[in-house]
């Protein structure tokens, strides 16, 4: 059986679900869609879209907040000639490209301990990337106030809802952001 003509669109996160759209060149007898991991394990329940003489289906699939790499939407389409199964990959962009489009986090695998840049390294970076140099603060912004908790309150942050460790850290900070 030849594969039917189709278009698949991954529309992204909508509230607590993932929205997908399937457009077919014919009216199927039924359509089922579900999220699967790279190894074929279901990431949530499949959704059945009643055909009702339609060629286009927008379905909201439940699944994890962050889709794992290699996740696919499996579409099972019941046609007059039989059943057609097609997997649509969701992570078309990978690595830095996906990170810059907020599709995924960059995997960082390193055994090196994190350390601050030395003065020489900061100087070389500033020469190559002048925008990294210290820029003056906007007028009236945090100028020596040292009262980060007060500023957070001004922005509507409920200080009582913060954990004690964070409150302690904020109290120790000065207006320049250093301890």
Image (spheres, rainbow, N blue to C red):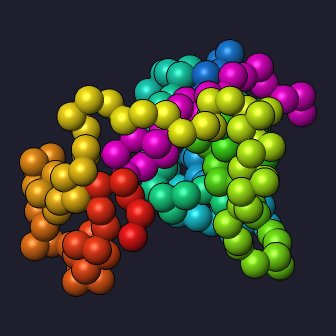
Quadrant of the rendered structure where residue 4 is?
top right
Depth check, front residue: 16 or 51: 16
User: Could you tell me which residue is drawn at 22 percent across and 59 percent down?
Assistant: 146
- Does residue 36 show up? no
Above or below, 101 against 143 in this view is above
Residue 83, image x, y percentages = 74, 43
Lateral position of residue 3 relative to residue 169, left or right: right
- Identify the residue at the far top of this view: 25
Lateral position of residue 179 relative to residue 174, left or right: right
148 falls in the magenta region: no
Depth check, front residue: 68 or 2: 68
User: Could you tell me which residue is drawn at 21 percent across and 34 percent down?
Assistant: 140
- Does residue 175 show up? yes
- The boundaries of the magenta stretch are 1-21
Q: Mostly what secondary structure, the magenta segment?
A: strand
User: Could you tell me which residue is drawn at 83 percent across and 79 percent down?
Assistant: 111
Residue 52, image x, y percentages = 44, 27
């Amino acid at each position: 059986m030849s594969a039917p003509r189709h278009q698949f669109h991954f529309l992204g996160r909508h509230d607590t679900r993932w929205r997908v759209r399937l457009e077919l060149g014919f009216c199927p007898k039924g359509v089922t869609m579900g999220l699967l991991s790279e190894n074929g394990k279901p990431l949530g329940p499949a959704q059945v879209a009643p055909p009702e003489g339609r060629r286009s289906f927008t379905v909201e699939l439940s699944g994890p907040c962050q889709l794992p790499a290699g996740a696919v939407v499996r579409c099972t389409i019941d046609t007059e000639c039989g059943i057609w199964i097609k997997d649509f990959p969701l992570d078309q962009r990978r690595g830095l490209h996906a990170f810059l489009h907020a599709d995924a986090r960059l995997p960082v695998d390193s055994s090196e301990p994190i350390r601050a840049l030395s003065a020489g390294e900061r100087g070389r970076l500033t020469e190559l990337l002048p925008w990294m140099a210290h820029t003056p603060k906007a007028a009236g912004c945090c100028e020596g106030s040292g009262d980060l908790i007060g500023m957070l309150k001004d922005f509507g942050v409920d200080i009582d809802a913060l954990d004690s460790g964070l409150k302690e850290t904020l109290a120790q900070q000065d207006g320049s952001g250093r301890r």
